[in-house]
Amino acid sequence: MKLLFIGDIVGQPGRNAVKELLPKLREQHKLDFIIANGENSAGGSGITPRTAGEIFSAGVDAITSGDHLWDQKEVMELLANEKRFLRPLNYPPGTPGQGSAVFEVQSSKSKVQSPLSIAVLNVQGRTFIQPALEHPFLLATEEIKRLRERTKIIFVDFHAEATSEKIAFGRFLDGQVSAVVGTHTHVQTADEQIFPGGTAYLTDAGFTGPHESVLGREIEPIIRRFLTGMPQRFEVAKNNVQLHGAVIEIDDASGKALKIQRVAEAT
Ligand SMILES: [Fe+2]
Ligand SMILES: [Fe+2]
């Protein structure tokens, strides 16, 4: 099967890019399943039922998140009711929502009896990122053990800041999952590869939104903030809107990755 992962969708420009480009990408890559990180989809900070609804309507099957999870209070409704919406797994027990979900996929080209199952797992790092959550490596291991009883096709969005933590996490999970793709830093890295155990890896998928910006926000206020140290309003920028992510091809029977290809598509 072939899946597309879309890096952090930033604000309305990001949502519009998904709506505009997804039909073309689906056709071009013969996609079976689409996952997107939606943590910045509401005005650049957080996610609401409305922005999640727009992303699902555009054709996305599962939405992951990260440290901006709580920025909009309406997220509580998503956490309570939307099974296709994931938060980082490694919150303490009792936190609303879920860190993983299993989806059924009708793959047209599969040699394996369909439908296929794909598990999506969202985990947050602990280095240079707030809040300090529980141990990502240990909790992910336990969760993946449970998920593998249901399917070998497992996609992991690792929302983390430090490149070292991301690579170490990917290497640690090599052979246990189909793919580990990083989010949060909003700059697409050029290190896509398949590790020896068959896990596809990319340190950061990049972000989907206005790239004439600083990570999706207007440039001037950010420079002013660095110059003065004073708080500024960081509005979502407007220009050079691109969709960033990766297409990953997975062997249905073994769950191992066959190919990973970066995507950077202009609107
Ligand atoms: Fe983030
Ligand atoms: Fe983000």
Image (tube, helix red, strand yellow):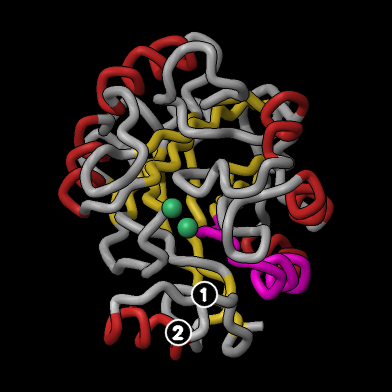
Secondary structure state at the residue bearing disc 2 = helix
| Residue 32 left/right relative to 134 | right
The residue at the point 51 percent across, 59 percent down is 7
Circle 1: is it few (<14), some (14-19), or many (20+) Cα within 10 Å?
some
Number of numbered discs: 2
Would you say residue 183 is visible in this rendering?
yes
Assess whether mark 2 and mark 1 are in contact (beta carbons under 8 angstroms): yes
| Separation of residues labelled 1 and 2 (CA atoms) | 6 Å
Residue placed under numbered mark 2 in the picture = 221
Does the magenta segment cover residue 194?
Answer: no
Up the image or down, 191 lies above or below 217; here it is: above
Circle 2: is it few (<14), some (14-19), or many (20+) Cα within 10 Å?
some
Percent position of residue 121, x then y = 49, 31
Residue placed under numbered mark 1 in the picture = 234
The residue at the point 70 percent across, 38 percent down is 107
Percent position of residue 93, x then y = 47, 12
Q: Residues in magenta?
A: 6-20
Would you say residue 28 is visible in this rendering?
no
Does the magenta segment cover residue 14?
Answer: yes
